[in-house]
Image (tube, helix red, strand yellow):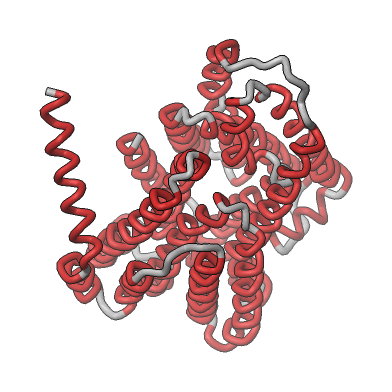
Amino acid sequence: MLLMTVVQRAIGFFRSIWLCRLLDDTVVGQWSMVVGFITMATPLMMLGFSGAMPRFVERYRLAGQLPKFLVRVLMGTLIGSSVLMTTFLLAPQSIGWLIFRERSSTSLVLNIGLALLATLVFNFIIELVGSLRQVRTVSLMQFLQGVGLTIIGLGTLYLGGGLSELVQSYSISTAIAAIPGIWILLRDWSGLPSSESEFDSKQMWKSLLPYAAALWVMNLLTNTFELSDRYMILHLISGGDEAAKAAVGQYHSGRLIPMLLTSLATMFSGVLLPYLTADWEAGKTEAVQRRVDQGLYGLSFGFTVCAAITLAVSPILFNELLQGRYKDGLAIQPIAFTFCIWAAMVTIAQNYLWVRERGALMGWTLAAGLAVNVALNFWWLPIYGLIGAVAATLVANAVVMIGTGFAMVRVGYQFKSTLIWGAALPLTLILDWKIALATAFASIILHRPTQQWGSDAIKALRTKIPAHA
């Protein structure tokens, strides 16, 4: 799974680089807005039902009532998706203005609607397959989506296609990537435990609806928070429509590599949640905290080291691969790495709140971060331009990370120095990549919990290797 994920991210990085080379920064900015809109709209359409599956599928699978549970989840998802798809059909020009700051062609907007529909089907299947802990299948689906978009998308651009054809390529690659999940479900469906006992719909909705509602609000806040800086750059930066789209393109280029780390954390978080849930249902509360502790610090250390190495070679990457056309993107990259690593840590940390079924606390934290982001962008963006937007996003991510830590402690998480060390490491990237690298390795030497984790890992390897041999 790790190998396929690394290869997929490498292919995604290659695709992003070539998109920046083949398109000017205004079209890159439009593509960034399309991807952001799809990312934000898809969970809204699903009303949080499919996202709740990792928490409840195991419960109903063991009870032999999984098919009945899934029928009800699917019905809820269809209700939400039908509303937004109807809006696409009835008001495409308004949707175009929302995404691009201009009334785009109807065909382009309808292509975005089809991409949304394909993404909805893909996400539902991948959530279900992941909930059943078919991790390799999830990894294969994500791999096929990334590789398919690279091959089909770049191929259409080389043949003279534009933004509409690129969106169509996204839809096709997403539909193809769903096939392994559909196949594995059809193959193994008959082997699921079965029970003839009566299904308690009232109890199911009583448990599911608060969880799904909290998840829906959190997804709305998370994706609005993640997209708000780009929307505000598009609508508030001075210089007219073309300058605004170009600024979004520059911002996109500066986040190319940092967002690879964030997407990797999202994958890891999705894999981690079912295992945390299994530990929690088995009463292993200490194991849940230990997994979260190790995940947070390990992610912070590993991502900070990767970011520092990347910053050392970034001038070559931007000057050679991107032909020196994205200088503003290069300038904002250290700050982008910092807030993307913080966002990745929040992605892991919030799993603890979902396992405790206290996801509503995450909503309040994200609302505070969003408010700070919007306020600071209104203040700094007209004065400082792109760098003001990036600085506002940095402060807002710090607010979200601190708020998440307080929320975890409130519901029983034992505060440890690991949280402070993990949060501080990415901040050193703003100073200098050499300082960040030195600090990261010094933390391994000086931080006692990491020494113990390393010792435990070595003991575990020594125990397992002879057994396998």
Toward which corner of the image does residue 330 lie, by quadrant? Answer: bottom left
Quadrant location of the C terminus in the rendered image: top left
Image height of 380 relative to 32, above or below: below
The x and y percentages for residue 185 are 57, 19
Q: Quadrant of residue 199?
A: top right
Q: Is residue 336 above or below residue 40?
A: below
Q: Is residue 445 left or right of residue 294?
A: left
Choose between 282 and 44: the one closer to the eye: 282
Could you tell me residue 340's position as x and y percent? 44, 64
440 or 349, which lies in front?
349
Question: Residue at horizontal 20%, vertical 49%?
Answer: 456
Drawn side of residue 352 relative to residue 460, left or right: right
Q: Nearer the viewer, residue 369 or 70?
A: 70
Whether residue 21 is visible here, answered yes or no, is no
Q: Position of residue 23 (x, y in %)?
A: 49, 52
* Residue 183, horizontal then vertical, whole percent: 54, 17
Q: Relative to 406, does residue 119 appear above or below in the rendering?
A: above
Taking the image as drawn, is residue 23 in sight?
A: yes
* Rendered view: 447 above or below 278: below
Tell whether 27 sits left or right of 298. right
In which quadrant of the rendered view does residue 451 lie?
A: bottom left
Q: Residue at x 17, y 71 (%)?
A: 446
Q: Residue at x 82, y 38 (%)?
A: 79
Q: Quadrant of the N terminus?
A: top left
